Amino acid sequence: MLYDVDWAEDGTYRPGEKNSPEKFFNDGLKNSCEFDLQLGYFSSAAISVLAEGFATFVANGGRMRLVINQIVSEADKKAINKGMNGTFINCFNLTDFESLRKTFDEYQQQFFDCLAFLIYNKRIDIRIIRPRNRKGIAHTKSGQFRDGDSVTSFTGSANFTISGLFNNLEEIKIDRSDSIDTMVRARIKSQRAEFDAIMNGQKRGIDYLSADKLEAAVASSCGGKDIDELLDVERKLKRIKAEKEIRRMNENNECVHDDCEVSAPHFPYPSGPRNYQKQAFENWKNNGQRGLFAMATGTGKTITSLNCLLEIYKRKGYYKAIILVPTQTLVEQWEKECRKFNFKNIYKVYSRNKMWKNEIETLHLKEEFNYSGNNFSFVIVSTYASFARTNVFKSLNGFSASQTLLIADEAHNMGAGRILDRLDGIKYIRRIGLSATPNRQYDDVANRRLAEFFGCAKSPTFEFSMREAIDQGFLCRYYYYPHVIYLNDEEMAEYIKISLQLAKYFNYDSSAFPQGDDILMALLLKRKRIVHKAKNKEVVFLDILKQRYKEKGNLKYTLVYVPEGNKLDETSDVFDAEDSIGEDATSQHLIDRYTEIVKSISRTMTVREFTSSSKDREKILSDFASGDLEVLTSMKCLDEGVDVPRSEMAIFCASTGNPRQFIQRRGRILRKHKDKYHAVIHDLIVAPLINSASASYNMERRLLEMEMKRVRDFASLSENADFTYTVLDEITTYYNITIL
């Protein structure tokens, strides 16, 4: 969360500038779940600064620790005023909270309602301190925002007063835990230790004053609102503020804070777009700004579509886009790619962003009030799961129909479920669909509707095949080694029983099983688990590793795709809203087992499991790219937009009836890297030997024939195609299948 904030580049926030103290505190509150704040005196009027993001902080499960000074009385207030040559400083007065409360405006009331919520739920710890045995006040202004993974700390001169935050020549300096500077990280650690010492009563030279009266006064005079009510007020206050700012800006013809661009959007690489990316734009433009781009994985579908958005900006002076993606991981990845183009005002609509509704409402207001004239620009990235919901769809479908570009990543996902039902209601004229494999298996109706939606009934608007990408040097060449795996006697006996039951459901016209039958789904899952847990897979897998280790002396840059085991291939065309695939005991056992086999190769072998629950995913990928980590064992999460260009060898241990997964995985292995000359792919294919007299023989033959088409396609583009056909000769002869 904190990692995603667009912090000031130089880490400095000053009153009246784009990066103001007000903006800093609101960004920090909205993206953290822990807030430490130590400050000097602050005024009730300036509390409104925290009101805008405080409810979001509370909704995030936020916990707060607050250290304030002893300026609590009228006498102290007068003494300070006198010392400041009569300059009026309206200090927060704890001695008469009820009188103070009567002066609250909506912002101040919101702050104390949130504070009361934290007090009532025991999620705030307050310390009131003063120097021991000497004059003066505790005047440190510092603190930290934390989200569990990262820290943003701050120190500065700005008081929590109107003057301090808006007028004075003061500043706040921030430090971030993701800094590579050891001094910065040490400073963050020291700051945390100092705060802990104060909170634990271990700090020398200070006296502690009781905060009980303050807590009791706030809790009794404010509060009573639940989280939803607090968030509603926050949205209302932000909307009021946005309306005022927009009116002021239109009156003065000004540009404000977030929407002022330091530099215009531009193509992220000096060489400019590749020729085929330029051609994709021309085809799309000439097709009425609708199109489906069928591009091989690894050829830059994301950049190709964003280049179309950039061309709109060059011609029209604005960019407006709604980007739909299958997973939360891809939301983050698309945001990064958009920033490379220097697109600003990027909003994410998915479960991790609790404030998406408020943000989109503000966007609608800006468009309604003609914010920045015709130059009003934005990018929204949403998961398909979110977009399909009624309230989200209504909100995201409400922007200018003629100006907004809809980009659908992995566009085949639009052909299923609630998304398919939404197609006719999507009003945006400009449309781009992206997919390496645009056609859905066994779903001609959905394929036809998708083609019509993207304006390409006969063929994709632009195609760039795997063959073209390899021949033109955009993807590396590869060697392909299929391994036919046979079931042992025990596995085969169980498989035959299930196969005979499945034969009753199989549709030979479509070469597929019907959907929705619970008994059928249970049988398919049982069969899948037999295939995935086949013991002979482990034997062949170990042999592959041993051979590679013998040849290279290590297993560096090896990816292992392990069976996930708990999700049917036949129903896996639609990606989940969550990155997790619901890992169960079976799937976890399998990845653990394959990881142990890798470790058995050498006592010094370095291997990590890469799953949806891995908290240090970036670190794992970085170590893999450098060679410090030799092998990654993973399940489906490596399909989800994760780039691993350094990978040199992949072992597919997961048999599946869905060719899309294999195509995605192949594309990831074939990404270019300056130190990679070619890739090696090993493919473990389970082929049960069913007696030709069996009632299930023809079904098994048809299923294997479909898998062999995928194998044939893989082999045809490889550097060793003849070898592949020889290896498969025994099984293809048994089932009388021709793959040439």
Image (cartoon, rainbow, N blue to C red):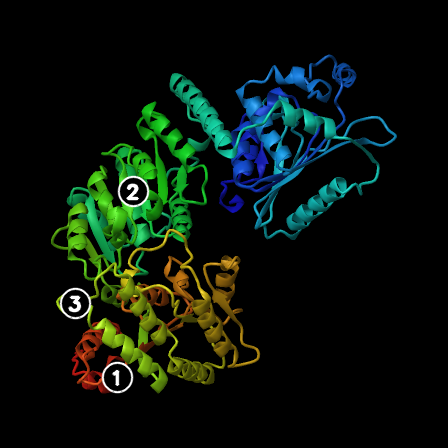
In this rendering, the label closer to the viewer, 2 or 3: 3
- Neighbourhood count class around disc 2 (C-alpha, 10 Å): few under 14, some 14–19, many 20 upward: many
Q: Mark 3: which secondary structure?
A: loop
Earlier in the chain: of badge 2 and badge 1, it is 2
x and y percent of residue 739 in the render?
18, 78
Q: Is residue 33 left or right of residue 358?
A: right
Earlier in the chain: of badge 2 and badge 3, it is 2
Q: Are marks 2 and 3 in contact (CB under 8 Å)?
A: no
Mark 3–mark 1 distance (CA, rounded to whole Å): 21 Å
x and y percent of residue 682 in the render?
35, 77
Determine which residue is flagged by label 2: 309
Q: Which mark is residue 689?
A: 1
Determine which residue is flagged by label 3: 507
- Using the image as rendered, state which of residue 235 and residue 482 is in the foreground: 235
Q: Amino acid at mark 3?
A: Asn
| Residue at position x 68%, y 21% in the image | 92
- Using the image as rendered, state which of residue 579 and residue 729 is in the foreground: 579
Image quarter of residue 567: bottom left
Residue 655 visible in this rendered orientation of the protein: no
Q: Can you say whether 655 is above or below 429 in the image?
A: below
Q: Can you say whether 607 is above or below 268 in the image?
A: below
In this rendering, the label closer to the viewer, 2 or 1: 1
Mark 2–mark 1 distance (CA, rounded to whole Å): 52 Å
Mark 2–mark 3 distance (CA, rounded to whole Å): 44 Å
Q: Amino acid at mark 1?
A: Leu
Classify the position of the C terminus by image quarter: bottom left
| Residue at position x 76%, y 26% in the image | 70
x and y percent of residue 538 in the render?
42, 80
Q: Is residue 683 left or right of residue 708?
A: right
